[in-house]
Amino acid sequence: MFKALAIFLAYLLDLAIGDPDWQWHPVRLIGRLISGLEKKLNIADLNRKISGMLLVILVVGITVFAVWAILELSGLIHPVFYFIIYALLIYFGLSVKSLADEANQVYAALSQGDIDGAREKLSKIVARDTQTLDEKEIIRATVETVAESTMDGIIAPLFYVFLGGPVFGWAYKAVNTLDSMIGYTNKRFADFGRTAAKLDSWVNLVPAKLTSLTIFISGYLCGYHRKGSAQWLVKYFFKGPKHNSESTEAVMASVLGIRLGGVNFYHSVAVKKNFIGEEVYPLQAKHISQSIKIAYAASGIFAATGIFLVWVI
């Protein structure tokens, strides 16, 4: 009951307050650790694959030890203090409201006809180039991001918290932050970031399937177009980790009756993604708000189910 109550409190805090934007946020601390170690390890004198693997071990190890130590010390102070720290550590790892807020800013700019503003807001939540995107491409990028972030910003952290509390949750966040910072295929990180990228894909494999399933259920509950959704769910459900993001985007596209995928540009380099979903409706700004509604519903379904299982088990 203790663990279930702490997770419930953390989830409610995130819904009410969102992810705080401050310099001592644990994700930012992990980011600084990665940046500092990367400068020392990603050098020509070292084997970049091995040094990249060492970076992953160091960052995940330090993160896990720090979270474990904080919990142990708080337990020595007082049980109530331990409960508060336990819940706060979970809360800092979630981003339900923040995801919705960021996507809503893009939606608001588009609703006002402010394409430049929408591009600027979008650039804060995607890695792709946004400077020349038209309205439909902005909508596509936002919906894709909502679908993928439902996985790595909500479902996956909760999944690992259910398995092993804040220690497991922050081990996941460390891996995910590593991938977001060095998991690229450019000249600088192609070898150095390979371990981080592969590990992130594997730790997201099960959460991706769970996210696809909860998005499918949420689409049904929210009353959106569902024809063919089950086919898209099944199509990706048994595929490997390299299809993690596609699996969540495909189900989101199918429940909304839109088509996602196409050509994205990253630092002016074109990357072609498979088209997913059936274009029953043309892309419209309202699809952003609909995807946010589905993300909220998916998070609630998963959180409630997990908390109940933690409580009874």
Image (cartoon, rainbow, N blue to C red):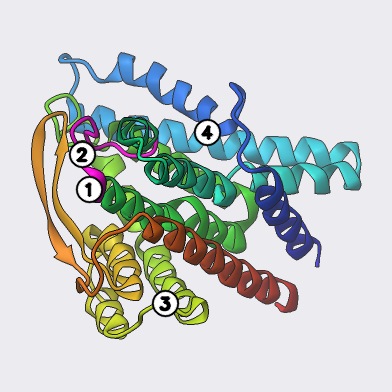
Q: Quadrant of the N terminus?
A: bottom right
Front one among 158 and 115: 115
- Mark with earlier residue (3, 4): 4
Q: Is residue 133 magenta?
A: yes
Indicate the position of residue 25 as horizontal and vertical percent values. 60, 29
Dot 3 or dot 2: first in sequence order is 2
Q: Which mark is residue 224?
A: 3
Does the CB distance between marks 2 and 1 fall below 8 Å?
yes
Closer to the camera in the image, 167 or 29: 29
Relative height, residue 85 to residue 181 (above, below): below
- Give neighbour class at mark 1: few <14, some 14-19, many 20+ (Cα, 10 Å): some
Instruction: Identify the residue under disc 2.
Output: 133
* Magenta stretch: helix, strand or loop mostly: loop
Please tell me the numbered disc located at residue 27.
Answer: 4
Disc 4 is placed on an element classified as helix
Which residue occupies 36% across, 79% down? Answer: 225
- The part of the chain drawn in magenta is 124-137
Would you place residue 205 above or below residue 182 in this image? below
Query: Sequence-wise, which precedes: disc 4 or disc 2?
Result: 4
Q: Is label 3 in a helix, a strand or a loop?
A: loop
Mark sitting earlier along the chain (1/4): 4
> In whole angstroms, how far apart are the C-alphas of marks 3 and 1?
21 Å
Question: Where does the image place residue 147, in percent across and percent down from the top left?
Answer: 38, 58
Residue 250 placement: quadrant: bottom left
**Looking at numbered disc 1 in the image, what kind of residue is underneath it?**
Glu
Nearer the observer, disc 3 or disc 4?
3
Give the mark, 3 or 1, whose residue is nearer the N terminus: 1
Image marks 1 and 4: residues in contact by CB distance under 8 Å: no
Check disc 2 and give the amino acid type: Leu
Estimate the spatial distance between the alpha carbons at disc 2 and disc 1, rounded to whole Å: 6 Å
Residue type, mark 4 in image: Val
Q: Which residue is mark 1?
A: 137
